[in-house]
Structure formats: C-alpha cells, structure tokens
Amino acid sequence: MMGPAVLFFLLFAAASPLLLVTQGLDDSMAKPSTIWINSDFLSHIHGAPRIIIRHSLQPQAQGHPEYLSFAAGFICVSSQFQCDDFFFAVFIYNNDTTAHIAGTDHQAKVIWSANRDRPVHENATLEFTSDGNLVLRDADGSHVWSSNNFGRSVAGMLINMVGNLVLYDQTDAAVWQSFDHPTDTLVPGQSLMEGMRLKASTSATNMTENQLYITILQDALYAFVESTPAQPYYSWYWGAYNNKKRMVTFMNGGLVVYGSSNTYRILLLPVAKYIQYMRLDSDGHMRVYEWSTQQWIIQYDVMLIDDCAYPTVCGEYGICTQGQCACPLQNNSSSSYYKPVDERKPNLGCAPITPISCEEIQHHRLLALTDTSYFDERHKIVHLNEDDCKQACLKNCSCRAVSFSYDQLGHSRCTWMAKVFSLQAIQPVANLSSSVYLKVQLRPSITASTSNKTKVMLGAAFGAFAILVLLVIGVTLYLRGRRKYGDKDEEFDFDQLPGMPARFSLEKVSGCTEGFGKKLGEGGFGSVFEGKLGEERIAVKRLEGARQGEKEFLAEVETIGSIEHINLVKLIGFCAEKSERLLVYEYMSRGSLDRWIYYRHNNYSLDWCTRCKIILDIAKGLCYLHEECRRKIAHLDIKPQNILLDDNFNAKVADFGLCKLINRDQSKVVTVMRGTPGYLAPEWLTSRITEKVDVYSFGVVVMEIVSGRKNIDNSQPDEEVQLINLLREKEENNQLIDLVDKHSDDMVSCQEEVIRMMKLAIWCLQNDSTRRPSMSTVIKVLEGVMSVETFDGNSILFVQDNPSTHSVPSQASILSGPR
C-alpha cells in the first residue's frame, strides 16, 4: 500500500461565503462561526489538496528541495481505492504542486487526531461555533468529538510552526491546543507531561488505540502495557527529587526533562537534518522518523532493548526466541497446554487449551519454563524462596503466572502476573537463574454426576451403538456414490475435501453461462466464460483434457478454496461431473493487467499512482501466499495475464493451477520446469526452486508495468527485444529513465519515484535467489518503511542464459478479457 490518500477541508461560512472564497491557501487561521465540510467538491487537480489551515515549512538544508506543511483537515484512513473513512487530524504533508500531480500525497503523516477510534465519513462537518467550541459531527449529524471549551472567549483558531492546533482568546493566549491531547506522536517542541499518555495504534493501517502506552511518573518516563495492574516494559529513570510535575520535551537532538531543580537531557538522539517526528508504534517501539528525499525514514529507535523484550511481540503466553514465536511446552515433555491463536500467525500468541476455572483450584498446576524471563519486574515480592513463590500463586486464582530469579549476590525475586504477555527465552548464565511458572488447568471441568459408574457404562454402550449406525450409513452412502460417479480410479470424491467452496451441477453452470456462449479468453489449461449467478457476475474456467485437468483442478480447488485474501481472486465454487472440471470465480470487470499496459486494446494510459497501487496489490497477494499461509505457496506463473483488475483497479492474483505447496521446514523443493517463457527465474535450470521464483517473476512484471511493454517483444529492434537485457544495459549506463513508459506524462514528471521502482525490480531480478528480497520486504519498500538494496546491472543474468528462453511445457495463457 502506498499510503493514505488525503482529502482536506471544504470551507463554508454561514455569514461571509464570498470572503472565504478569496482567502489564500497559506492562511493558517480561522475565525468562529465557520463550518468545514469533508468534501472534494472544489478539487481542480486530481489529488491536489484544498487547505485553509496550514503552516508551510520552507527547506532548511541544502539537498532538501521539498516543501512540507503542517496542516489540519480531514485525512483518509481507508486502504480502499474509494475512501469513506476519515480522521479530523493534524498532519505533515508535501505541499509541492509537482508532488501532488505525481501522486505523493500518500506521504502525509498524522501527528494528532481527534477521532482515531471513530472515523467519520464523506460530508462530515467540523464546526467552529460562535462561542469558540470545535465540534466534529458525522454525515448523519451524530456527535463524534468536541474540544469542550464552551464560553471561553475564543477569538480564533490557528496551526503554528511546530504543528500545534490552537484555539486562542483575545490576548492570544491558548484556550485549547492539540499538544495537550497527544495521540501516538510527538513533534519537536512538543512535551509529554504527567497525566498525559501516548497510546500506540492497533496497526500501521488501523489507528484505533491498542494496549501499549507511554506516560510520565514522578521518577521516570515509563512504557506500559495495559492490564490490572499495568505492566511496565521499559523506563527512563531520573529519580524523584521534589514534588514538581515532570515533563519530557522532544527536542532536535534529544529528550529533555523539566520539573526538577535542574533541567537536563536524559537521552541523546541524532540531530535532525530536516523535520522529524517521534511515534509510539503498534509494536511498542518508540521510533524517530525523519523526512528525507520524498519519504519518511526511521532515524532512531529510542528503546534500545531486545526485540523479544516487548510485551506483544509474540502475543499472550507466546515465547520469543531470537525473534521466533512459539507456544509454551513443559520442560522435557511433549505435553501441550496451549494452542496458537492462529497457526499461520504465531506472533498473535497462544491460548490455554483448557481455560482456568477458579471453582476447581485443586486442579491448578504450574508449568515450569526454565531459562525464561518476563519483561515486568516492577510487581515483585522479595524475601520469598522459590517454593513459597509458587505456592502463593497456586493459592490465589487471580495469579496467572510467576517469575522467579536470583542473581550473583544470591538476591531472589518473585514476580506475579495477573495477565501474561510475551515471554522471552534466555541463554543460561552461571550464578544467574530465571524461570517462569505458568498456571494451567490439568483437566476439563467435570461434575460429580458424570463420574457415576453406571452412567459411564450406559454412555459407552450408547456411543458404540451410535458408531455402528453411522458406519452402516457411511458404507451405504459410499456404495451409492461409487455407482453414481463410476470407477474409483477415474473420479475424485470431492465432497470429502475439507474447506471446499460451493459445488454446482454441470446443468447449473451451463445455465449460468448460457451454454458457455460468451468466451472471455483461453489459455494452457482451458477457456474462461462469462456468466451470471443470480445478480452476481461470474467467470467460469473450463479445464480441458480430463487427465491433465484433474491435477490442476485439485490444486486450484484445494488451494484457493482454503484461503481468502483481498488481493487473491475469490473461488466461489466448482463443478465436477464425469470428465468436466469447472471453476467458478468472482468476475473481474477490467480483465487482466496485460490489456492495460501493452496498449493493444486502445485503452487509456494508467497514471503512476494507479500503477504503484497495482504493484503493491500484487506484492500483498504474493506475500500472503509465501508467508501467511500454513504452508508456503509458490504460484510459479506470475505474469500480467494472471493479474486481474476490478472496477477500481484493485489487483488480484489469479490462476493457482501451477502452484506448488512448500512445507515451512523445507528450504527448496524439486519440481519439473513450468510457467511462461520470459518470467522464469534462473534456478529453474536446476529444478530446485523456492518461493523466490515468484519474486523474480514479480520483478519482470514490475518492469513491464513501468515501461508499458512486453518482456519479450519481437516488434522491437533486435537489441531491444529482451526487456531484462535492456534493463541491464540501461542500469550500467545510468540511463534507466529511458525505459519509462512514454504514454504516461505523470511518470515522466516523477522520475525519482519511477527509478526507485526500477531499482526495486532489479533487486527482485537478482541471479542469486538468496539475494532477492522476500515479498514482505518488498511491501516495506513500497510503503516507504525501508530503502531499496541497490545492485549493479551485472547482477542480472543475460536473457540468453535464462531458462525463459528454453523450451518449457506450459503454454502462455491469453486471458485478457474481463473475468
């Protein structure tokens, strides 16, 4: 995802509409009796902001031509192409007109929000009332947020040079200011005082509050995770010297403590070359970000602690070992008392298989985890030996675990936990010890009545009878099924496959497609037809060649039927009758990507922002297949014909008929060469492949999107037929800009971004598969979280050495129509 799209204030005044029309864009002030409406009605340039409250920041250092502004307005928080969720917020954005046209408004960063837990919609209003109150209402008129300063003689509102949104009175004194109500971010010059909290967001795309926060106490600045009581996972301690209230101010080059007899710096940070902000991220890290060359980069991680020391790194009860998450196991035992919340995402934590019941405290036991530590050492009880520590927890049902440790001096520490977050595996050290004991329930709750011997015997007899009846029914159904579908070797019992989508009869599918009358396209494994299922348009893939089709059919049904992702084409159902194999997919109205980048269909040129969005969508779909499924799924045939687009140009990966499942403990798998010429990675020559073959194909597709041409185009001059050879040559001669699609004017105007995208493609096209990035790394680069690792052209294999030019068994699919 390239970041949130930004929509700003549309200003209306109850008293003086004509006056407001003449206000300049650089105006950083507003007066009472004014209403702003969340609307893009007055947009003259696609993507350009409409701002009436902002403070521009001119370039402060050589080499930084960007023009940044602090602005207040409505900002989109949806990841969808058409946005309908907004915050009223203060944010930093690039106000360079060229940047707006080039589509870089996604770089806007929210530093404060009034309604982070309740987004508003199109036509929501912000009213600066006549009595000086700021009121946010949704489009339906419902109250969302207010500054709550009625009757305070407010004269106006402004946003100042440090990004503080201020309501001020006749003496220019602040009546209300956003700095007094921080969200998850501090900017230089902003202070965090006792009683204030920075609360982290749920995720990078979900700004609702999560359970991590930072606050100031008398003796230190603490980072907590919410529980009863709250558990600290980090602190900057300075001691309590007097009763004055403390505050910590984020300055250029450090954090400064105020409130004691002496003002002193407690943490040195890198001095900023340009504008910075400090944010408590969703993972609990406190990071400093700095603007550099059209993007935000991480400058410093304030909390210099081990990644495994953060309370939510592996979720509740999860054990972190060198960055890997797992559920607890009894020492020297295979007994399991915990299960993953999501087996495909171990970082989400674990849950007890048997919930702890306070009514059965006699069945509570402690699960011993040696060489394990816990981040919270504040809630400790001293003067207890290890046995007393454990017994005290067993006698108190509110205690969920204890940590016991001792140091070289023989000092012991017993720490109680009423709620258990992430644990950390540690290396054993002489004269030091740390163990964690988790409370578990030995057996499921049972009542005394179920232990009655007679009832047990009756239950066993009834169970045996029921099993016999079910067995007879099962055999009968099986025999009927064999008679219906023929010989066992010729047909599959598809109904027995777990997690299957809907099954349709051949008559039903034929009717939906009007007898397979409208063909959308055809490829190596069959044809695709348009149809309609009720009011929903569908695309039906008809596999051809019964023997060959069965294998691909099972692969697609079992794979696509068991996973679902916004960037993967959804399998609605299937049909299997005798030799017919049919797959029913969601209909993608704009067809496949090749029709939009090769210009053979007389379509209009895609703008740069849309191309970037398509590239990010493809990366997300592949990342899900490679890293988030229980088994890694290598697609093996990534190309523009297998990338489908909906009405809003959302891209989805299609055609899993060639996919290969890879166990998580396998580094490589051996398979026969398959795919499409021009997109095959060099390692296909060895037939030992990993998911990195998809990364190579992704790099080829990125270059096709950027250049607007086919990878292998025989209509080009001989020296330009092979796009990857041309890319190698242009990179060596520092002429990458020559490859940019000349049909797109906005791509020519944002050369730096386009070249950065081509360098990402070069990274993906590395001859050595181990040097290619993972798809999750690709996403971080596309979202601006990390930089591209650069290589020279020599690291890309010449195409004549690439197996793409050798004979391959698969026919390139030609499925360009809507489907």
Image: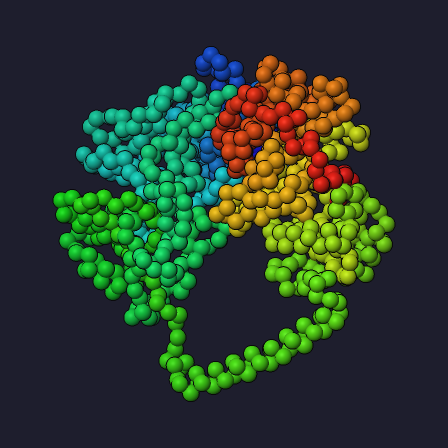
Q: Nearer the viewer, residue 808 or 433?
A: 808
Please state if 243 lies on the left or on the right of 638 as rendered. Answer: left
Please state if 334 lies on the left or on the right of 711 as rendered. Answer: left
Give the farthest residue toward the left.
Answer: 409
Q: Quadrant of the C terminus?
A: top right
Asked if residue 436 shows in the view, the reply is yes
- Which of the 4 quarters of the picture holds residue 195? top left
Q: Nearer the viewer, residue 111 or 301?
A: 301
- From the viewer's perspective, is residue 128 above or below residue 384? above
Please state if 497 lies on the left or on the right of 575 as rendered. Answer: left
Picture residue at 57% right of the left edge, 21% below the top: 793
Image coords of residue 498 (percent x, y): 60, 61
Image coords of residue 536 (percent x, y): 75, 52
- From the viewer's perspective, is residue 250 above or below residue 407? above
Picture residue at 50% right of the left edge, 26% below the top: 789
Give the farthest residue toward the front.
Answer: 686
Picture residue at 56% right of the left edge, 37% below the top: 692
Picture residue at 32% right of the left edge, 28% below the top: 255
